[in-house]
Every structure is written in C-alpha cells, then in structure tokens.
Image (cartoon, helix red, strand yellow):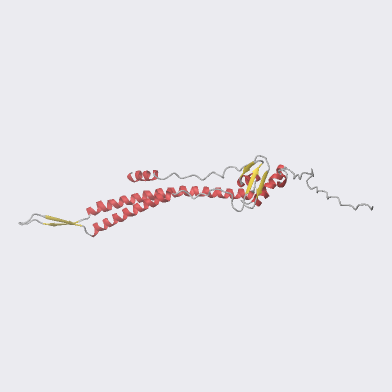
Amino acid sequence: MGTAILVLVVQACMPPLPPPPTLGYGEPYKGTGQPINVKDSRNDWDITEGNRPMTSEQALEASGDPEYEARRQIAKHYNDQLYSEGKTHRRNGTIMMGASIGVAIIGFLAGAVLASSTLDTTTVPADNMMPEMRTTVAGGTAKGFVFLGNASLIVGLIGLGYGWYGGSRPPPYHRWHTPEALNRPAYVRQHTEEYNDKLGAPATGQLHGPIDDGLGLAPGQRKPPPPRPTRGGGR
C-alpha cells in the first residue's frame, strides 16, 4: 500500500503528456474562389489570393497539390505514433518507479531489520569476579545484509529517477511547415496556375489586366512603324 501511494505521488508530479500538434494538420484550406497570384523577385516572393496575402501552405492546399498533402499526412501519422509511444513510455516509467520504490523498501528492511537479527552474540558466563557479559558483533551475514540494503537503496533511487525522466519527457513532435522542396516560387506557381485555370481566371501575367502603353493598343498588337520620309519635288 505504501509503495502504491508513493508511486501515485511521484506520478502526479509528472507534467501532463502533450497531445500531437494540430496547427497545420487540420482540414486543408479550400480557397475563396479568387485567383492566386505568385510574384517573386530576386530577394523575396509573395502570394496573394485576390487582394489578400496568403502563405505557400494555403496556396498549395487550395490548389490540391497531392505531393504536399501526402507529406502532410505522413507527418501527422508520425506524430500519432510518437503520441502512442509517449503513453507507452509513461506506463513503463510508472512501472519502473514502482519497482524501484519496492527495491528501495526491501533494501531498507534488509539493512535495518535482517542485519540486526543476524548479529553474532557472544555470552561470557558470570563468575565470582564479574557478572555475565554479552558481546554483539556484526558477522559476515549481517555485513552482507547491510551491503545488500545499501546497494538496493541506491539502485532504487536511481531507478526512480530514471523512470520519472523516461516517463515525463514530451515526444519530439514534428511542427508542420511547408517542406523546402515544395516551398519554392516555381513549384507553387505551377500548381496555382492549374488552380486558376480551373477557376477560369486569366493567366498569371494577366491577373492585373492588359498592359496599356497609352496608345490604346490591344494586347499583342504592335505599334505601327513611323512613316518613312519622302524626297521633296524638284524646283
């Protein structure tokens, strides 16, 4: 009963096991029906949905990129496995703490009780000069119980600390972010252009309207060449 109470007390001191992260692992972003435009420069790049900025994760989720979603599900399954292993480690740590406390108690009893009961006692009978005398010394058996008790106590304390440490560590969850291989302007643009085609949106370069050079020319129409000079008539 005492061992069980001590295990419960030590286990209550453990921090709660954190669940797997949910940020980035929920339902994929569905988009608002607006075209997605990916613009990049030499030093930076940005993504907009209509006039609203968005992340590469949202762009790839809205476009339904299968590679992105497959990697996201693999990472989510990995976190679920870590959570299951974390619960197993906590159970094993609790068992180890209980066993360690039991070993420590057994060691204490062996060193304090059994060692005392196995002392060698020598009795000297009384005579005319002195009364009866008894001498108690620790023999080999008593010294063995004392050594066993001390060793068991040390092992129990070490096992108690190791069980608590192994059972209280949080799992090394994977915090989701867009993989570097997919977090590139060219990759995101490729999938968002396909997404824009499904929406019936214009091509990426035409999202902001045709280029107007001030002459009222239609897209693709060339500026007419200047008139060639002609020779003047004779005098």
Q: Name, please, the residue furthest toward the left.
A: 128
Q: Residue at x 39, y 52 (%)?
A: 162
Residue 75: x percent and y percent? 56, 49
Q: Name, please, the residue furthest toward the right.
A: 235
Q: Residue at x 32, y 44 (%)?
A: 2
Q: Name, please, the residue furthest toward the front.
A: 235
Where does the N terminus fall, quadrant-wise? top left
Q: Is residue 180 left or right of residue 127?
A: right
Q: Is residue 202 left or right of residue 134?
A: right
Could you say which quadrant of the image residue 35 lies in? top right
Could you say which quadrant of the image residue 146 lies in? bottom left
Q: Nearer the viewer, residue 56 or 133?
A: 56
Q: Nearer the viewer, residue 134 or 202?
A: 202
Q: Residue at x 60, y 46 (%)?
A: 57
Q: Is residue 128 left or right of residue 176?
A: left
Residue 158: x percent and y percent? 36, 53
Q: Nearer the viewer, residue 52 or 118?
A: 52
Residue 119: x percent and y percent? 21, 56
Residue 38: x percent and y percent? 66, 47
Q: Name, please, the residue furthest toward the top.
A: 32
